[in-house]
């Protein structure tokens, strides 16, 4: 079976950046199957990369190498790393991009990449995606053990992600991502809601407050909502999501990432 | 030979949606070659998906599985279906997305997908692209017979597509698609024009009226037109297309999809 | 090993153009691995295609077929060509798109494509990407010798690219590309700068003038620059590049391609 390497970056698809990485990978590992997760991460947006990677990566076959390059600190002291979990390899800069991987992994090992004989010759200081990360991913996918690339480290970088505040009858969270459709994804999930239910809350009469609007209850699917009305549901990742059927909730609520969301249930 | 699966959706390429489907496919069918037709269909635009699919799909090898997910009704009563023609398999929601496939197919069979053991475990009600359509496409491409996925149906959904009105010396049509270059594609073709010619029309003096402008005759290729002047030709799909050489006809004519176009020939 | 075919075009990814070419390639050569370099070249921008191709192509394995379709003259007299260098094949229109390939190649042979039995049947005059270039690339990648497609020519088209003007202590160049991040790439390189150094110039006190601003010295990497301040470095292609750390130099300098850049060193 051909090894799979996924790519996530803020390089866009107009310039030659992503394609250069693919060329480097195929030169080393012509059997690799390269799949783009996204190259449209907002420039330098480490959180968006972390979120998008987490949404996609778990659907790939065991052994997949996930290469992530959102790397404003390229060339500075920040370390290149390999993260090994029970299912996958991750390759990228140690800038917090793998925070959600660290949170979800059952087993975890992180290596500081230092073995320069796996890099392109004479790597520069502005495009490690091409000169360091792509060749390392290609060699990893060829079966080189992760330990060969450098020493294990434990002081890897994690983003500080604010958790939702949960009381007996409310959750105070915020919007962590807005997707192409203008759907707004919160930082609380079906599991968080279950805590309120188990505390005796009446979930069928839940009220979600966002941007001065009140949304009553949770829909099961998008088409169930009235046209033009903000609504909410538990989405395909298990997160509570604010949407407007066939419209952009973001536009309708004049809202953006970071917006506060309050979920309350009567008792 | 590796099976080919194409993807057409309104998911965009910024979020993890399309990549999640690819991961699901590769987990089931690691040999599949996945080719994007487009993920930039306008959100919920079923017609644009139908048009784009039709423009691309016929160029693929026999046996290709075409997976199409523009699915505003996901989770509601609309059925997931497989369409089998003399050349291809199509997988997606029964919302009219395959209307042009139905029109062009010589042989046609449509199955309502119900065999849940081919789905991801515990499919949700908001992302059937990932939970139902992607796994079904992957299994189809592995050779599972279409009949195994569910019963044949005959009451599948078709979009109502207005045909051009053809008289002895004129065609009244409209713009059905505007491409990246601002070229405007009509709903009448070289074959429609031939009907006028056979009726004695003088094609070399044809006049095309659109948005208050008159275009005389048909060019053979783009560079043949005078700069800045709207012109027309029969395009690579056989359709009459309005264009401006190296400019956007859409912008120059302040026009959009649905705009009326009148093609007349003197007799 | 599967043959690799890269695609560069101004077709965008919304319409069916690029996917149609991929279908045609896979029908002829199902083993081909197709990699997109970019489909977001600005419409009809031959220079941008030449620049983007050059940035990416050298990273691919020997024998890769690079297919490039930015082709405003499609259907007119402009010739379809194959370019053969010591490492790669290039297929596309003879409109200057391969100018940088001609400049860098050690060995070079150009063929006028005329062997119509390699084309799609009844090729049209508006989409040679699909009807001529894609099938020729697919056959080339299957091992058909380039000579089989047509006669060698020597009068192929080259873009007139203004070189930087180099004096004893200055370089007068201009911006040739602005990337997704708003970084502005000049037409002079580390090698050009070396000429000044060898002439006795004091490179550590270099001054770069652009859009009424003065930039002192060269950084080694992006994060080294002060926030909000225009800075310069030698980028991953060896070119001098103007940037603003985590911002868009293009926006900050209200600048665009073609902008003059003056690099001076005290002596």
Image (tube, coloured by chain):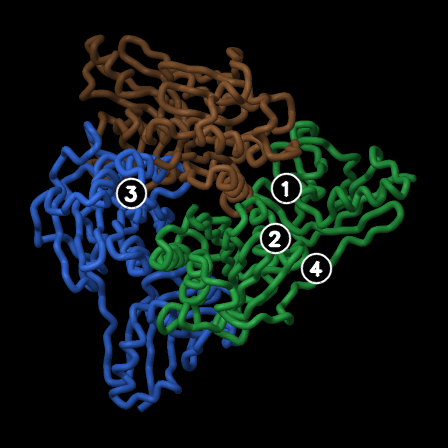
Chain colours: A blue, B green, C brown
Q: Which of marks 4 and 1 is nearer the N terminus?
A: 4
Contact (Cβ within 8 Å) of mark 3 with mark 2: no
Percent position (x, y) of residue C198?
Answer: 21, 10
Q: Is residue A243 left or right of residue A199?
A: right
Question: Which chain is home to disc 2?
Answer: B
Mark 1 vs mark 2: give the one in front: 2
How far apart marks 3 and 2 lie (CA) works out to 40 Å
**Which residue is label 3 attached to?**
C246
Crowd rating for badge 1 (residues with CA inside 10 Å; few <14, some 14–19, many 20+): many
Report the front residue among C160 and C4.
C4
Viewer-proximal residue, A22 or C139? C139
Query: What chain does mark 1 sit on?
Result: B
Numbered mark located on residue B183 in the image: 1
Measure the C-alpha gap from mark 3 to mark 4. Answer: 49 Å
Q: Is residue C55 above or below residue B80?
A: above
Question: In the picture, residue B241 is in which quadrant?
Answer: top right
Q: Which of marks 2 and 4 is nearer the N terminus?
A: 2
* Chain at tag 4: B
Q: Residue B51 carries which label?
A: 2
For image coordinates 15% across by 53% down, the residue present is: A157
| Crowd class of label 4 (few under 14; some 14 to 19; many from 20; radius 10 Å) | few
């Amino acid at each position: 079976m051909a090894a799979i390497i996924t790519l996530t970056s803020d390089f866009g698809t107009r310039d030659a950046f992503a394609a250069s990485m693919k060329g480097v990978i195929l030169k080393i590992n012509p059997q690799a199957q390269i799949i783009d997760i996204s190259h449209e991460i907002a420039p330098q947006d480490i959180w968006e990369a972390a979120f998008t990677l987490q949404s996609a990566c778990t659907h790939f076959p065991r052994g997949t190498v996930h290469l992530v390059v959102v790397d404003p600190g390229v060339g500075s002291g920040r370390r290149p790393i390999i993260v090994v979990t029970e299912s996958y390899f991750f390759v990228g800069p140690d800038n917090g991009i793998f925070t959600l991987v660290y949170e979800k992994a059952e087993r975890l090992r992180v290596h500081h990449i230092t073995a320069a004989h796996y890099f392109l010759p004479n790597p520069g200081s502005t495009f490690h995606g091409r000169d360091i990360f792509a060749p390392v991913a290609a060699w990893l996918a060829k079966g080189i053990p992760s330990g060969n690339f450098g020493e294990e480290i434990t002081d890897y970088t994690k983003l500080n992600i604010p958790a939702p505040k949960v009381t007996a009858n409310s959750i105070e969270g915020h919007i962590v991502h807005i997707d192409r459709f203008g759907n707004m994804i919160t930082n609380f999930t079906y599991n968080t809601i279950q805590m309120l239910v188990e505390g005796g809350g009446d979930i069928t009469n839940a009220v979600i407050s966002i941007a001065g609007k009140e949304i009553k209850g949770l829909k099961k699917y998008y088409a169930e909502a009235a046209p033009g009305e903000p609504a909410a549901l538990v989405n395909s990742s298990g997160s509570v999501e604010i949407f407007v059927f066939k419209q952009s909730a973001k536009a309708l609520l004049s809202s953006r990432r970071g917006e506060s969301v309050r979920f309350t249930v009567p008792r």
